[in-house]
Image (cartoon, rainbow, N blue to C red):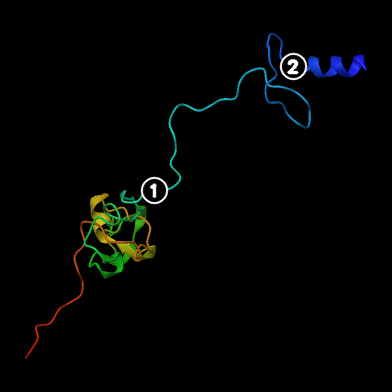
Amino acid sequence: MTSSSNNSTSSLPAGSGSPRQGDLFTREFNAKPPKRGSGHHIKLAVEVGQPTKVPGMAHFAGSGPKRTYCHQCKHCQDIDVYRGGRYRKPPNPSGNANVTPIRTKREACMKASQLFDGIVQRGGIGANPSCKYFESNIVKFPRSD
């Protein structure tokens, strides 16, 4: 019986008055308290009313007109991507006139590409609430009454 009491106290850290949280499998206790972080907290969910930044958008989602979405904006379009991930055609050093795009980003923001020095971010942003650069691509015809 004395060996079992010695076994439980031998795994306690030296100089500690009270036992700390131990490992249930090895029955060892940490000598130092666990690291609590650097004081910065990471929010996992966005609070209601806070603007959210979506990769590929020119500004915060939801900062545009109410009840409008990116797919309704004239800047949301299919963008051809050339060398270096940019939308502009690169200079052609060989003199050939047929420079072809590497790929096409569907539903990408042309305004964001212009603001980020021609680098095309990700596409597929059409379902997000519009940003402050929203310009409607819906043509309204005057009524002929």
The total of numbered circles placed on residues is 2
Quadrant of res 79: bottom left
- Along the line of sight, which residue is nearer the eye, 2 or 100? 2
Which type of secondary structure does the marked residue at label 1 adopt?
loop
- Quadrant including the C terminus: bottom left
Looking at the image, which residue is at 43% across and 41% down?
43
Left or right position of 110 against 30: left
Under mark 1, the amino acid is Val
Q: Are marks 1 and 2 in contact (CB under 8 Å)?
A: no
Q: Is residue 50 above or below residue 128?
A: above
Which type of secondary structure does the marked residue at label 2 adopt?
loop
Residue at the spot of label 2: 12
Looking at the image, which residue is at 85% across and 14% down?
6
Tell me residue 27's x, y (percent): 78, 26
**In the current view of this chain or complex, which residue is farthest to the right?**
1
Residue 118: mark in rendering: none
Looking at the image, which residue is at 9% across and 86% down?
143
Under mark 2, the amino acid is Leu
- Quadrant including the N terminus: top right
Left or right position of 19 against 117: right
Crowd around label 1: few <14 · some 14–19 · many ≥20 (10 Å): few
- Along the line of sight, which residue is nearer the eye, 100 or 124? 124
Tell me residue 138's x, y (percent): 20, 75
Specify which label sits upstream in the sequence, 1 or 2. Answer: 2
Tell me residue 38's x, y (percent): 46, 26
Residue 46: mark in rendering: 1
**In the current view of this chain or complex, which residue is farthest to the left?**
145
